[in-house]
Amino acid sequence: MIPMNYLAREASADYLKTGYWSRRSLQDPLLFGAVHLAWDGEPSGFTCLPTQADLDLDPEASYFHYILNETVEGLQFHSIPGMDGVPRFCDMSSDSLSRPLPVERFDLIYAHAQKNIGPAGLIIVLIRHSQIERQLRQVPSMLDYRNHRNAHSIFNTPPTFAIYATLLVLRWLEGDVGGLEPMAARNERKADLVYRAIDTSHGFYRGHAVPENRSLMNVCFNLANKSLEHKFLREAASHGLLGLSGHRSIGGIRASLYNAVSESSCQQLAAFMAEFQARHPSTPTSADAP
Ligand SMILES: *Cc1c(COP(=O)(O)O)cnc(C)c1O
């Protein structure tokens, strides 16, 4: 919908290629206009994110698009890239409502519900009125943001159950957790438990992301001895630690620590990691292998 509504045939939009999901965001814009890659993390294996100085930004770009948290690789921006004067568009699907964010610095934010907010089927879009008026071309009515705005988000019948469940989650977040500041503090403590288990393992576990771009939501790592990963996953499952396999595109291990995951689950995972390592003391690491 973004390029269909806001990218003209003769114009170009700036995109960051920082991982699996942003790579997928690069295809559809080509149906409508041109894409300029302001940074490409593929040569470095999607293990880090750019700093502002690394970006090749076009001041004439129709908009600047990036993904706040690369869910598959476990990379998260901890500062806001882009340039003033170019509308900033962002996919926040995998870390929305996980921490406070200066929304006033964005022109369009979108996030599906199913990772931090509620059941699948719902997508939340925050869009600036001035942006909505920049509509370029006639598009099918369902794909025109103005129709959704004008109809107060009931242009069609929305997924009412997903919206109701989201209401309950938001009440929990505000009332029980206490809002986004305590949620962020909780998420930092959770991620810290798992990253500490990696960092104190003397290389037995190896984090995918460079430390400065580590995601608080998705902790992605490998075992130095990759042949042990299957056993790790199987034994973790027998301890009730489920859903730890990495995304099929990169494999390895991924601990997703979305808002709903408790601190005690993270403690149990960290304890299991230490205990599993202790049971495999003399395992040669791949770095030691000839
Ligand atoms: C999971 C994910 C998606 C895909 O969402 P769908 O609702 O399955 O299309 C897109 N972007 C990010 C950042 C994601 O984490």
Image (cartoon, helix red, strand yellow):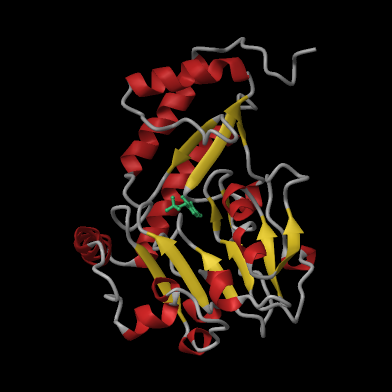
Q: Quadrant of residue 106?
A: bottom right
Q: Is residue 34 left or right of residue 78?
A: right
> Which of the image's four quarters has the C terminus?
top right
**Image quarter of residue 159:** bottom left
**Residue at 61% over, 9% down:** 282
Q: Is residue 102 left or right of residue 10?
A: left
Residue extending farthest top: 282
Residue 170 visible here: yes
- The picture places residue 211, in percent across and down from the top left corner, at 64, 47
In x, y percent, where is residue 168? 20, 61
Q: Quadrant of residue 82?
A: bottom right
Q: Is residue 175 left or right of residue 34?
A: left
Q: Say whether residue 200 is visible.
A: no
In this rendering, the answer to whether 180 lies above or below 116 is below
Left or right: residue 259 compared with residue 68: left
Looking at the image, which residue is at 61% across and 80% down? 87
Q: Residue at x 63, y 49 (%)?
A: 19
> Quick one: 63 or 210, which is closer to the camera?
63
Q: Is residue 134 above or below residue 238?
A: below
Residue 256 or residue 26, whichever sits in front = 26
